[in-house]
Amino acid sequence: MPRSTGRGAHDERLPPMDIKAVPMTANGIRASLLTDAERRELVAIAVPVGVRAGATLYRQGDRADAVYGLAQGVVKALRRTGASKRTVAAFLFPHDLIGLSEAGRYVNSVVAVTPATLYRMPVTALERMLRHNAELEYHFLCKVCHELREAQRHAVVLGRKSAVTRVAMFLAMLERREHANAGGIHLAMTRSDVAGYVALSLESVSRTFRALERDGIIAVRDRHHVRVLDRKRFDRLVSGA
Amino acid sequence: MPRSTGRGAHDERLPPMDIKAVPMTANGIRASLLTDAERRELVAIAVPVGVRAGATLYRQGDRADAVYGLAQGVVKALRRTGASKRTVAAFLFPHDLIGLSEAGRYVNSVVAVTPATLYRMPVTALERMLRHNAELEYHFLCKVCHELREAQRHAVVLGRKSAVTRVAMFLAMLERREHANAGGIHLAMTRSDVAGYVALSLESVSRTFRALERDGIIAVRDRHHVRVLDRKRFDRLVSGA
DNA sequence: CGAATGATTGAATAGCATCAAGGACCGTGG
DNA sequence: CCACGGTCCTTGATGCTATTCAATCATTCG
């Protein structure tokens, strides 16, 4: 398994550096947070990085010397819980920030779920930039607030006791975060990753997908594509009936 | 149940406005984040508020027009999950920030667990201040990162399947966050609140405390005071044996 | 002191984890 | 194009653990 960076054939036609979230006081529109000027400023310290699926970007406990902006692809944040067990702390999508640290060390490991391109920003340079550009920093603040809300939602999911509810809430989350197009939900991750995120056994996740399909609530095209058929009952599950 | 504010006998001898967390690049020392100058600036827009135990500071869905700094006491953030069910999204302690919102609405309800004093900061004024004081804003950013880590830890707790592990991890969390003095752990909240946080039934929490006591791992003085007796086995539970 | 809230304990049930085996899919190389 | 290996996924049978329902006990506060 490749260890890390390795800037592949990604160099031409890079998607732009960007961060998106709901500003604190706005009306719920997911807007681009960065102005052109800010993007330019960030690009000055941001190095594009391409990784293959399965590659580890960094490991829990490593010295945290960079923050990443995800431009393309899906990655997962893993956390060791006890020896030899790992849970999925979060899935991260384009326009998300990556690199949460504590006392100079990363608190999660980050692994690419799909091929991904990121912008690597050294913390020292970033911190210097933020500390004298309040406007730019404000956008980072909004983004972190967004990730905080997302983490709380995750906790809500894990609080539900029924397997169907957990899985349905997870699908609803994907629907919101990835392109919520009418073409159905795209699951970039494996069943095992889903299990790690919703804290169920792999087998239970599998059975639950089956059950949802049998009941006509969702249609499972293949492992990576799901569509909601009965929106009414689906929503009832999500709200935890 | 009293609805909200009501500035009681708290006005004299107020604890100072402050925020504490681990700065991103520091060496893990829980430091005061605010300089004296910043404290003075914040106090200009911060109104002290005292609430009784059980009082609701604000409700999920309310227009989010203020952020609060908790100065004294313990409060809980509740989230509605389905009709008529509530989970505890977080417990908040002195020096924590309160008032997470999305699209101008609070995402949690906040209720005082003990009598509490807070500093109320209108978002508009705060936002204006942050947007042109990068240094101050940086401290807020660090604080939100801290709460993000805390929320992820919460998710880790909820991911563990065994009741003893969940409860032990909860106690460990309290030990870290409240005064981690050798005098034992102080539980300001009810068993029912604990159950809401670790996502177990009230009865299971009760039984689990009992079991931990019977096994000589903890001593339960009364409902609000617990002491770890067998640190070795306790830590083994926390790491999820 | 008495009512209301909070906590404990017991017995029965439901639901998920676990163990175990088989089947589908993917990428590789012939 | 097809065969092959590995990974990922599905399905079944069993046991364990937390939930639930129900009743009793303790504590706090008026």
Image (spheres, coloured by chain):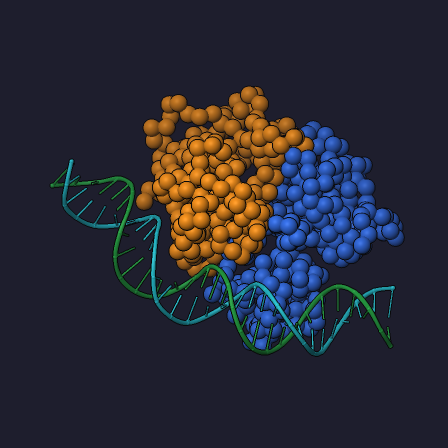
Chain colours: A orange, B blue, C green, D cyan
**How many circles with numbers are drawn on the protein?**
0
Q: Between B238 and A233, which is closer to the camera in this rendering?
A: A233
Residue B203 position, x and y percent, is: 62, 67
Residue situated in front as seen by the camera: B127 or A173: A173
Q: Please, is residue A232 above or below residue C16 in the view?
A: above
| Residue D25 placement (x, y as % from top left) | 71, 78
Q: Residue at x 56, y 41 (%)?
A: A147
Looking at the image, the residue that sits furthest to the top is A36
The answer to whether B92 appears left or right of A191 in the picture is: right
Left or right: residue A36 versus residue A117 is right
Q: Is residue B47 above or below residue B217?
A: above
Q: Is residue A43 visible?
A: yes
Left or right of B203 in this view: A11: left
**Looking at the image, is D24 positioned above or below residue B183?**
below
The N terminus of chain A lies in which quarter of the figure? Answer: top left
- At a point 53% along the width and 24% down the height, the residue shown is A39
Q: Residue at x 78, y 56 (%)?
A: B53
Q: Nearer the viewer, residue A188 or B237?
A: A188
Q: Position of residue A93 (x, y in %)?
A: 48, 36
Q: Is residue B33 above or below residue A47?
A: below
Q: Residue at x 64, y 50 (%)?
A: B83
